[in-house]
Image (tube, grey):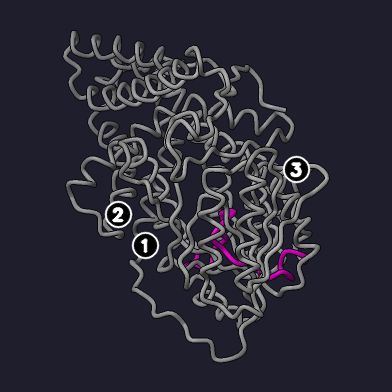
Amino acid sequence: MDSLSPIAVLYLVILAFLGVFGLHRLWMVRRFRRWDPEEPEVPGQELPRVTVQLPLYNERTVAARLLRAVGAFEYDRDKLHIQVLDDSTDETREIVDHEVERLCQRGLSAEVVRRPDRSGYKAGALDYGMARADSELICIFDADFIPPPHFLRELTPRFRDESLGMVQARWEHNNRDESLLTRAQSTLLDGHFVIEHKVRSDSGLFFNFNGTAGIWRKQTILDAGGWEHDTLTEDLDLSYRAQLAGWRFQYVPSLAAPAEVPPDIAAFKSQQRRWAKGSVQVARKLGWRILSARLPWRVKREAVMHLLGNTGYPLVLLLAVLLPLSVTEHSHFGGLWHVAMFVLCTLSVICFYDRSQRALGRAGRHRLRDVPAAMSLGIGMCVSQTRAVLSGLFSETGEFVRTPKRGDAPRAAGYRAILHGIPGLELLLASWFAWGIFRAVSQGMWGSLPFLLLFLSGFLWVGGLTLQSWWRGALPGRKEHSWRFSGSSPR
C-alpha cells in the first residue's frame, strides 16, 4: 500500500474511534433478548403511598390531558397524592387550577405547588415538591406523557425488594407516524429504550432514569444527595449518584407510557442540545468518581461509553469534512478498510436500529423507511450536537430550555422553540458533499458513493428543515414567537 497523506491518516484514525462505538452497538445487539409480555403483578400486601409529581412550565397544550390521565390511575385514593409543580407564567396556570379543582371534587388528593422563583429549573421544582411529600415513593411525569391507568399498580409492587431504588418504564411515541421526522426520531429513541436500557438492566450495568415515566424510592433520592441542578440532565446525574450509593435500578420494557416526540426540527434540536450538553456535564462531574469507585470493570466501561456517547458527534463532523477530500485516497486503503468501515460504522448502526424496530413488531416496509431516515437524521444533527458537546465541556451549566409540546392543540396554538446558531448551516456541508460526489463520479470511485450520499441526504434534510423553520418564524405576523440566533449557549 502506498504511503498515505495526512488527510487519509486522520480519516482512518477517526474511523477507528467511530469503530469503537460501532463495536459497542454490535455488542448490544448480541446481548439483547426480546422481553415477554408481563402480567400485571397483583399486590400481595398493602400498597405503598405514592406522590405523583408533575413538573410544568408553560404547557397549555398538554397540561389538562396529563392531569386527566393521572386522575384516571387505578390506585387506592387514600394512597395517592398528586403534586402539580407549576412554574408557569402563562395561561397554563388557569388550566392547572381548573383541572386540580376537578380532581379534588372527585375525591382525589391533589394540590398545586408554586415556588417564589424558578431557581434550579426542573430539578429545583422536584426538590421543592419532594420536601413537602410524605410518600414512600415518588412518581414523575413530564407534561406530554399520557400514562396508562394501570401504571402505578404494575410498578409499585416491585418495591417490595428493599434494594430497589428506581423503576423506569419504556417510552412510546404517540405521534410517531406524523411525518418522516417524527418517525426518524422515534427510531432513534427506540434504540435507547428497546436495546440499550434492556441490555444494561439485564446485565447488571448502570442505566438512567429518563426524567419521566418512572418511580423513585424517596430514600434513594435522599441517599444520593437529592436533586442537583449543576447539569442540564438532572435525571442522569441523580441516576448515577444513586447507583454509586449502592441502589439497584430496574427497567420494565413491557410497560410503555405514550408521549410526544418534537414535531419540528427547532424543538428537536433544542431537546437534543440539552441532552448532549447535559450528558457531557455529568461525565465531567462524575467521571472520576465512577472510575475510582469499587465497581466491576465492566460496569465502569459501560458507564463511560454511556456518558461519552455524544462525543461521537464531533467525530462524525470531522469525518464529514474529510470524507470528500479522502475520496482519491480510497484506492490506497485496500479492500479490508472498506469492509471494516462498512461493518463498524454503517452496518452496526443498521443492525442496532433495525433490531429495535423488529422487537417492537414494526413491519419490514416501515423498517426500510425508518432506519435509513434515523441514520440520516443522526448525521445531519452532528453540527448542532458538536456545538452542544463542546459547550458541555467548556462552558457553565446554562439555562434549562424545555422542549415545546404541541399536544392536541392546533399548530398555530403551540409553542415554538428558540433556534440557536446560524440557520441552515448544514446546507454548506451538503454543498461540500455534492462536490465530493462529483469528484468521486469523475474519478470512478463508485465505492465511496453510498457514504457520500448518506451524508448528503442528512445535511440536506436537517439544513432544509432548519431553514424552513427559520423562515416561518421570520414571516410578518409571527413576531410573537421567540426566536434567537446566538453564537453562545443560553444563560
Viewer-nearest residue: 391 or 261: 261
For marks 3 and 1, give the one nearer the viewer: 3
Quadrant containing the C terminus in the rendered view: top right
Q: Residue at x 76, y 49 (%)?
A: 124
Q: Residue at x 52, y 37 (%)?
A: 272
Mark closest to the chain's N terminus, 3 or 1: 1
- Sort mark 1 into few (<14), some (14-19) or many (20+) by Cα contacts within 10 Å: many
As helix, strand or loop, the secondary structure at mark 3 comes to loop
Residue 219 is one of the magenta-drawn residues? yes
Position of residue 98 relative to residue 59, above or below, is below
Viewer-nearest residue: 54 or 462: 54
Which residue bears the numbered disc 3? 230
Residue 163: x %, y % from top left: 65, 77
- Find residue 375 and report its image quarter: top left
Q: Farthest residue in the right direction?
A: 116
- Give the magenta part as a residue range: 201-222
Which residue bears the numbered disc 1? 32
Q: Farthest residue in the bottom direction?
A: 44
Q: Residues under labels 2 and 3: Cα distance?
A: 36 Å
For marks 2 and 3, give the one nearer the viewer: 3
As helix, strand or loop, the secondary structure at mark 1 comes to loop
- Sort mark 3 into few (<14), some (14-19) or many (20+) by Cα contacts within 10 Å: some
